[in-house]
Image (cartoon, rainbow, N blue to C red):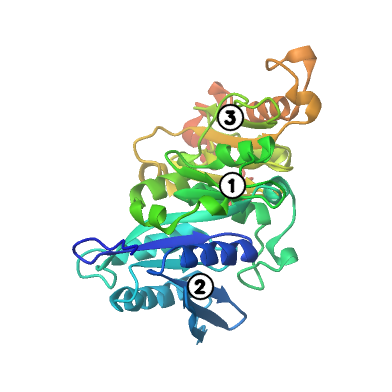
Amino acid sequence: MYRTGDHRGIIPVSVLATIDPVLRDSALFGLLTDAPGVVATRHDIYEDHLRRVVLDATGVIEDVLVPLEHACLSCAVREDAVPTIARLARDGRWDHVLLALPTSAEPLPAARALAAETVRGGDLDHTRVATSFTVVDVDTLQHDLLGDDTLLERGLGLTIGDERSVGEALAAQIEQADLVVTHTSHAEPTETPSPTPSGLLDRLRGAGTRRVDGLHSLTAAALAAARHSPARAEHRAHPLGAVAISGRGGVPEDRSWTLELRSPLPFHPERLLARIESLGAGGLRARGVFHVADRPGLACLWDGAGGQLAVGDLGPWSEVCAGTPPHTRIVVVGVADAVDADAVGPDAAGLLDERHRLREVFHEALCTPEEAAAGVEWLWREDHLAPWLGARTV
């Protein structure tokens, strides 16, 4: 008999996130039939309620509608998930609980909320968070990640006002997960996923994460045997945790690339505003941190995917990026055109591909050392970035 609870009766809890409802149900079915000791609670969001379905290898055990009393839907899921998981873990019939999040939901907030309750005296102190994982369709990954489709256009939005792109949701799930599971509908189980989408996936995965190719290779025992680290998960999700993988990878047909744009200098506010579309638009995944000359001591977020770019105020650099000096760093992931992929070296044949263009625009938007040295004088100049970062405070 498959048993995962340890000698103290601590029950592992795994969290599943995906943008594909079919893959979510396929993964659950495989895991529930893989081991009779597994139970799953699956959540879905509707306009004014949450649907919770609890199921195991025997079928559906509960199917409940929970009214939503506030606008924070991710909070509503967590508030229902914690007592549900606590109850299932104490039931005695099961020794591994799966939490399947609504499609397009990010896994980190749920894993964070669960981990917080596993401490002594918490509602889940008889459990531990084992694995946060996502299932990705490699056949559609390149289009999903770099295309400009929105979640609402796909019918995947968490709310009627969810403005995220599909790429933004997918990137966050890949970057935050402990484990990424691939699926392809066009290959035999033993075949290797297509090189470029596979390369994109590995460029986005967080440091120290795992990958399994094929739902047939995903087992409940492997999920339960792992141990989720909240500290590592938070680091992966932090913009400072963006991984910069150099080189073209080990497969010649892989056209994915990573570009790290980095400088100790801050952005020039006016030049950044003039170039922000050139730097942030297009089929790219980009994230990082930056500082601006007219906002000394402030850490700012850069987060782009699916043709959308978000910049924002993260707070004081000394708090949100403690231990690192102020700098500007954006890690960009994309796919080269076929002709670009054949080039060797940054200036091969004078080829000006997307990476070279981004480097040029990035350095044009930075302050010169002389401009950066102006210091507090910047605070008396026009605030060009107020629409993006909020009103500047002196």
Q: Residue at x 68, y 17 (%)?
A: 346
Mark 1 or 2: in front is 2
* Cα–Cα gap, marks 1 and 2: 29 Å
> Mark 1 is on which residue type?
Asp
Would residue 86 be found to the left or right of residue 78 on screen?
left
> Mark 3 is on which residue type?
Leu
Q: Which residue is mark 3?
A: 261
Mark 1 / mark 2, whichever is N-terminal:
2
Q: Residue at x 74, y 25 (%)?
A: 341
Figure quadrant of the N terminus? bottom left
Mark 2 or 3: in front is 2
Q: Which residue is mark 2?
A: 42
In the displayed structure, 83 sits above or below 295; it is below
- The x and y percentages for residue 163 are 67, 63
**Label ID, residue 351:** none
- The x and y percentages for residue 263 are 53, 27
* Cα–Cα gap, marks 3 and 1: 14 Å
